[in-house]
Amino acid sequence: MRADARRNLGKIVEAAAAVMAERGPAAPMELIARRAGVGVGTLYRRFPDRAALLAAMGEHYVHSLGEALDRAVAEERDAWSALRAFVLWAGDSGRGVLAAVLAGVPEEATVGPGFEETRQRWLERFTALVRQAQADGRMRADVGVDDVVALLNLFACHPGSLPAHVAARPTWFLGLMLDGMAAGAARV
């Protein structure tokens, strides 16, 4: 996909997430187009129906996770620092709107043709990062990938189920939980 097309897709997906967060998954497509700054015809040419838009939102979300993970690995000094940076990025409340909207619709509605392949590639890279942090002696060996993914799922996809004081400061609480995953942290 061309860079300008990806930017337009990103604008539409972000607008759709914001509108759906306010109005629910059945929000008017016209409102989504207006919020994205595109004509409704452009929106329908790109997404002929709501199912296509939801599938694109799912794929865009997983793609953004992969890009953020790659950035964290490239910018941080070691696997544990990259893992922390990524988890804090993913759990940021502003970023969680798209994840929360997607969590509120049936999974099959968000799975487009590239979704599973993109998700699997992200999960493999994420797993390798967790294992490297453990091999480096920076992360507890008894914490699994599923534990970290469950933490991300709670903070990014289901912030409404968090107590209000936790949801108001997600990166603070994620940082505390990550501290508990560090090598040498007290065991329960």
Image (tube, helix red, strand yellow):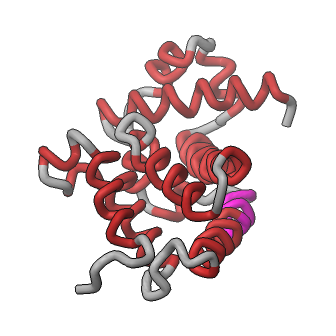
- Residue range (magenta): 114-121
- Image location (x, y in percent) of residue 88: 44, 49
What residue lies at 41% left-to-right and 49% top-to-bottom?
91
Observer-nearest of 184 and 152: 184
Locate residue 179, reporting x and y percent: 35, 64
Residue sitting nearer the eye, 101 or 34 = 101
Residue plotted at (55% across, 18% down): 36
In the rendered image, which quarter contains the C terminus?
bottom left
Number of marks in the image?
A: 0
- Toward the left, the furthest residue is 164
Where residue 69 sits: x, y (%)?
A: 64, 53
**Most foreground residue, 135 or 114:** 135
Residue at the image point whose x is 62% and y is 14% from the top: 38
Dominant secondary structure of the residues highlighted in magenta in the image: helix
Q: Is 73 covered by the magenta stretch? A: no
Residue 143 lies in what quarter of the image? bottom left
Left or right, residue 139 beside residue 170: right
Between residue 170 and residue 137, name the one nearer to us.
Answer: 137
Quadrant the N terminus occupies: top right
Q: Residue placed at 40% from the left, 62% from the top?
A: 153
